[in-house]
Structures are given as structure tokens and as C-alpha cells.
Image (tube, grey):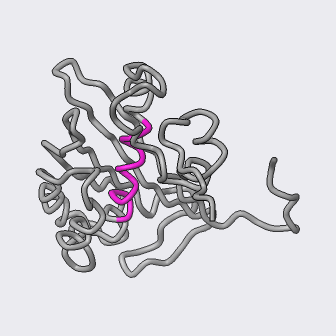
């Protein structure tokens, strides 16, 4: 169902976030993430006027992961920033993502290594959504390798959202082996 019709309004800002997942020939995966902020009007920055339509931020982050979703390489690029020559100096810090698992407390470790002045607010914000993007990238491969509900391992996605809660109707219907049954009282 779509959103309700909005009240009369005027577009002022667009933030676009994209993440593309690529299966590499060497068996690894690249997640290419981008965050771009664009104003519809000219804005005055301390570094000068940024014309409307030109990005205030155009930041990219690439992480390379293995099949276990461990980051084996990372790099950042800042193509548009409000403070050229300053904001982009933090890009090498994103190498600190190497060795982190996207599945094991990634956001906590990300915060420890790159929050606040240790990183770029926007690149770190972008990195926070990498785990779910990686799961989506692997989902079709993972689901194709399963033998339905007979799999010996509980599907990763179960109990990670409202629809796939273990005590819910979706799990009862599609994953009955893993469904939690109400205990008679």
C-alpha cells in the first residue's frame, strides 16, 4: 500500500543511499555503497557557495567480504564534501573495517573504531547498513542451497524481524520445524 497523499510541499533536499553487491571471480564479494546529499537550492558553506543540484556529500565505501561475511578489504572515497582537503583525510581510517564480521556485533565494533571524530559521520552511517545488504546479496544463493525445512541449520533470517518471528504464522507455515509452539498452560 502506498503512502497517503502528502500535504502541499516543496523538495529541498535529497539523500540517496545505494549499495550494490558484486560476486567476484575470485569467490569474494564487493559491497559498493554510496551516500549522496543534494540540495535543490544554493547553500552557503564556510568554504563557499554550493550551487543547488551539486552534491554536498558524495561518499563511497567499498568492502570486500568472504563467504563468511568477514571483511577482507575496505576503502573509502569522498568525491564531494563540504570541507575539501579536510573531510576526505579520514578515508584511510576505513581500512579498520578489515577483519570485522558483518554478522557478529559489526555495528558495535564499527562504533568503537569509527564513531565521532574517529571517522566521517556519513561514511560510518553508511557502513551501518552493510550487514543487511550483504545478507540480501547472499540470500538467493543461500536459499537455493537449502533443502527446505529439512535443513539441519536454522535459517539465518528467522527471528530477526516481525514477520519471521519464531512464534508467528509465517514460521509456522513455511518453517514448521523451527516454529515455537505455545506451551499449554
Residue 100 versus residue 93 in the image, above or below: above
Left or right: residue 20 versus residue 86 is: right
The relative height of residue 104 versus residue 74 in the rendered view (above or below) is below
- Residue at (31, 72) in percent of width and height: 83
| Residue under the point 45% across and 44% down | 157
Quadrant into which the C terminus falls: bottom right
Task: Report how many numbered discs are placed on residues in the image.
Answer: 0
As drawn, the residue found furthest toward the front would be 185
Compared across the picture, whether 162 is left or right of 88 comes to right
Q: Position of residue 20 (x, y in %)?
A: 40, 36
> Which quadrant would residue 84 be assigned to in this image?
bottom left
Q: List x then y, in percent, for residue 150.
A: 43, 25
Q: In front: 1, or 171? A: 171
- For the record, the magenta segment spans 125-136
Left or right? Give the position of 97 relative to 87: left
Seen in the picture, residue 155 relative to 118 is either above or below; the reply is: above
* In front of the other: 79 or 45: 79
**Where in the figure is residue 167, as x and y percent of width and height?**
58, 53
**Residue 145, image x, y percentages:** 37, 20
Q: Give residue 46's quadrant in the image.
A: bottom left
- Asked if residue 156 is positioned above or below residue 124 in the image, the reply reads above
Residue at image position (24%, 41%) is 69
* Closer to us: 163 or 185: 185
Task: Examine the residues drawn in magenta and state their main secondary structure.
Answer: helix
Amino acid at each position: 500500500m502506498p503512502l497517503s497523499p502528502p500535504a502541499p510541499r516543496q523538495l529541498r533536499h535529497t539523500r540517496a543511499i545505494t549499495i550494490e553487491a558484486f560476486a567476484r571471480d575470485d569467490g569474494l564479494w564487493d559491497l559498493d555503497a554510496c551516500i549522496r546529499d543534494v540540495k535543490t537550492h544554493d547553500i552557503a558553506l564556510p568554504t563557499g557557495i554550493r550551487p543547488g543540484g551539486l552534491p554536498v556529500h558524495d561518499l563511497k565505501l567499498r568492502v570486500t567480504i568472504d563467504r563468511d561475511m568477514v571483511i577482507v578489504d575496505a576503502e573509502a572515497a569522498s568525491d564531494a564534501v563540504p570541507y575539501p582537503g579536510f573531510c576526505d583525510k579520514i578515508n584511510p581510517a576505513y581500512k579498520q573495517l578489515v577483519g570485522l564480521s558483518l554478522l557478529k556485533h559489526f555495528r558495535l565494533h564499527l562504533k568503537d573504531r569509527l564513531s565521532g571524530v574517529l571517522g566521517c559521520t556519513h561514511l560510518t552511517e553508511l557502513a551501518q547498513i552493510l550487514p543487511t545488504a550483504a545478507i540480501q546479496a547472499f540470500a538467493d544463493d543461500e536459499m537455493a542451497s537449502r533443502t527446505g525445512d529439512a535443513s539441519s541449520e536454522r535459517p539465518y533470517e528467522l527471528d530477526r524481524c516481525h514477520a519471521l518471528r519464531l512464534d508467528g504464522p509465517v514460521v509456522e507455515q513455511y518453517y514448521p520445524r523451527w516454529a515455537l509452539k505455545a506451551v499449554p498452560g
